[in-house]
Amino acid sequence: MREGRRLYLIQTAEKGIAWMRLRARARPGHGAVVHEDNAVTALCAAVTRLGKHRFPLVMTDSVQEFLTAVGEETGLDFSGDNLEGAVAKLGALARLIGATLRDTANPTMLDAGYKANVIPSTAEAVVDCRVLPGRQAAFEREVDELLGPEVTREWVLNLPPVETAFDGDLVGAMDAAIRREDPGARTVPYMLFGGTDAKAFSQLGMRCFGFAPLRLPPDLDFGAMFHGVDERVPIDGLTFGTRVLDQFLRSC
């Protein structure tokens, strides 16, 4: 990074949140006999295939703009064939950015049976899926191929991805507010791998941005604190952000 130069992120996109329930049905029976038609076995095989699958790399507009800006500031090259290798050089930030390069489907819950010697007729799992903008139909086709005919799926929750362009009066106002407090700053767009209430507001035709300005020390692995023990922000960073938001709101 250039000396004295700090990048501040403005969220222009977020992945979709899709919680999926998988269900396998088969013939129940006694656990002490040979029994090949087992719902637990069918479900576990499908969950394993899905959990180990790597969805394709996809470069969305927001991520492309982010990486271009980071490349200009750091000299890193994100244009080659080894994109993930280049992203890995971002250190602690790599885990967060890596999650915005592909869809994910992580099994999180399993449920089957009620007694050790009874083979159940059904087995269920829940999978936390996060889908990139523009990828929903392709994602579902890929999931169905992985699950196979023995397992059905349904959405427990299916909230769409969101993406907007990094332009307009609001972006200009956010950029100006940051620069008043940090003249050497540069604002850049990015994609959030989680979700916000932008999923609801975007359905009303609103353009949504995530703006929570913090000035963080360079050695702080801020992303590792998300949903962790003692989740927190530095007090100096919080007071800086308060001043920036005050500037922003007064200018709007």
Image: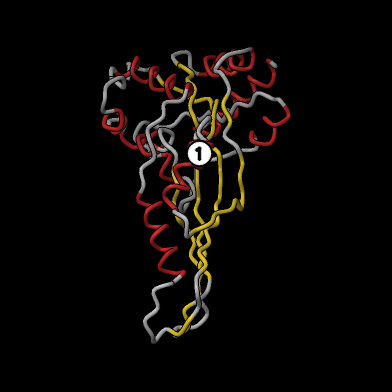
Quadrant housing the N terminus: top left
In the foreground, 169 or 135 = 135
What sort of colour scheme is used for the picture? secondary structure
In the foreground, 55 or 150 = 150
The kind of residue on which mark 1 rests is: Val
Q: Is residue 65 left or right of residue 205?
A: left
Q: Tell me where residue 169 appears, x and y as whole percent.
A: 64, 12
Q: Is residue 130 above or below residue 64?
A: below
Quadrant housing the C terminus: top right
Q: Tell me where residue 36 appears, x and y as whole percent.
A: 39, 74
Q: Residue at x 26, y 25 (%)?
A: 81
Q: Tell me where residue 198 appears, x and y as whole percent.
A: 64, 33
Q: Is residue 145 above or below residue 215?
A: below
Mark yes or no: residue 23 visible: yes
Mark yes or no: residue 240 visible: no
Q: Tell me where residue 242 appears, x and y as whole percent.
A: 60, 29
The quadrant where residue 104 appears: top left
Q: Residue at x 49, y 49 (%)?
A: 227
Q: Where does label 1 land, which residue?
A: 131
In the foreground, 17 or 11 = 17
Determine whether the residue tagged by mark 1 lies in a helix, strand or loop.
strand
Q: Residues within 10 Å of mark 1 (few under 14, many from 20)?
A: many
